[in-house]
Image (spheres, rainbow, N blue to C red):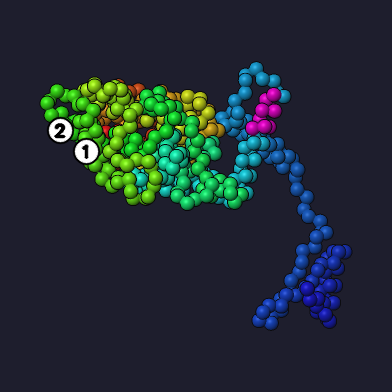
Amino acid sequence: MIRLRGRAASALKRAATSASTRPIEIYTVRSTRGISTTRFARDPYKPQAPQSSGGSSFKYFAVLAALGGGALVFDNKFGPITKPDADWSEWFDVRRQYYTREIGKLGESYSQGISKEYKQDIFFAYERRLRSFSPPEKVFEYFASVSKDGSTYMTLSDLVRALLPLHPAVGSGETRAGKLQGETDGKEIGVHLDKGEKLSKEVMRSKLFELFDTDGNGLFDFAEYLFFHTMISVDCATATALFHKYDKDGSLSLDAQEFVHLMKDMREHGNKRATGLRTGLKTGVEDVNEIGDGLLNYLFGPKRNKKLKESAFLKFLHDLRSEMDGLEFSHYDVECEGKITARDFGYALVAGSKVHDLPLFLSKVKTLPGREARNRVSRADFIAFCQLAKHGDGTFQTKMQEISDSGAPISRKRFAKLAKKTMGVKLSREVIDIIFHVFDVDGDDSLSYEEFFNALITWK
């Protein structure tokens, strides 16, 4: 600060003291061009005009009331559930623990820089591309988690994650489902698990898959992975045509040897890139067309003396895909409540979308409520939707396409009626609201047919 000197300073100070008994700070600021500007600092002691306090007090209490009411409404919708007969001390204690925990989670996410949810999205998109564009050997190598006797195997959870694009469930600690060859587990160098450790756990159970596991170790080799991949990838029309191809005597049934040839043909039809030699992975399988004893025992008996009828074969396809629907629900039902969050159902909806469409759909799913909301999607509602959109003979899809091509809007009411009429499926209001939230792209309360069916995983 540079003070004025001489007559100019004396004159200005006399003017200031005549207006107030307190001095006003007077200084100049010299710019880079050498031009001095005189400024007068405000007198911090100068009395201000009195203001009415009545209006301010009213506004103060009004704001407090609004904040308190808003907090109660927020707590009622998103807060923890407390017993109706809980006393006030228990009520406050439950909420204190709940919100302390939730705020702590936010602080942890902030301290880590990049949120876990963001990492989950990144790995989900990566694994989606891996399944779409990589050879089966690479997919098997990424998801398989068990090394035994020099060979690599999958658990049931590994198998389901390899076959289905599953986003980590809301509230789960999982970031990714597999890891690449050569990645460390992170524990060796004391870094965070995201550096490479597989976070998937063996949490899935299936009575159907247990029937195939003759030795009871719960593991699947590369050939078995190829079998299941083929069975859920090839559409029913192609599978039926190939069945008739190997039904030489027209008996609508196949023996074990004919079925092995059928599966080889189906695999080559859907996966011509599977050789078992592309990655150098030690799978312990010399022949990728080999079918496990458990599967053959299930279909043809231990002595291989039974025949597989066409109706039984198609039923097996249906049962297998329905079982996959149930395992998909179990993946999102992390607390085994029989219900999943709206956001988890949204993840299931968009899991099959094209890779370049994923960011758009994921951004819409993120706006759906997670575990903080009480409204959930039940297992029955989830399976009903799967039966409608993933299964069936395509009647529902065809009718939807006809309505879309005619230019008529596909409203919520029309969507629900069409589901009931074509497939006998009654969708809950919660499910329909989530569907429209994600796929009503332009916000006109009409379903976008193309985005809807291009995003779904469909069992054909």
Q: Position of residue 234 (x, y in %)?
A: 26, 36
- Residue 307 as seen in the image, left or right of residue 54: left
C-alpha distance separating marks 2 and 1: 10 Å
Label 2 secondary element:
helix
Q: Quadrant of residue 23?
A: bottom right
- Residue 57 as seen in the image, left or right of residue 445: right
Q: For the stretch drawn in magenta, what is the main secondary structure?
A: helix
Residue range in magenta is 90-98
Label 2: how many Cα within 10 Å (few below 14, some 14–19, many 20+): few
- Residue receiving disc 1: 265
Q: Position of residue 325 (x, y in %)?
A: 38, 29
Viewer-side residue, 169 vs 9: 169
Residue at 35% over, 37% down:
225
Marking on residue 401: none
Dots 2, 1 in contact, CB < 8 A: yes
Q: Position of residue 82 (x, y in %)?
A: 62, 23
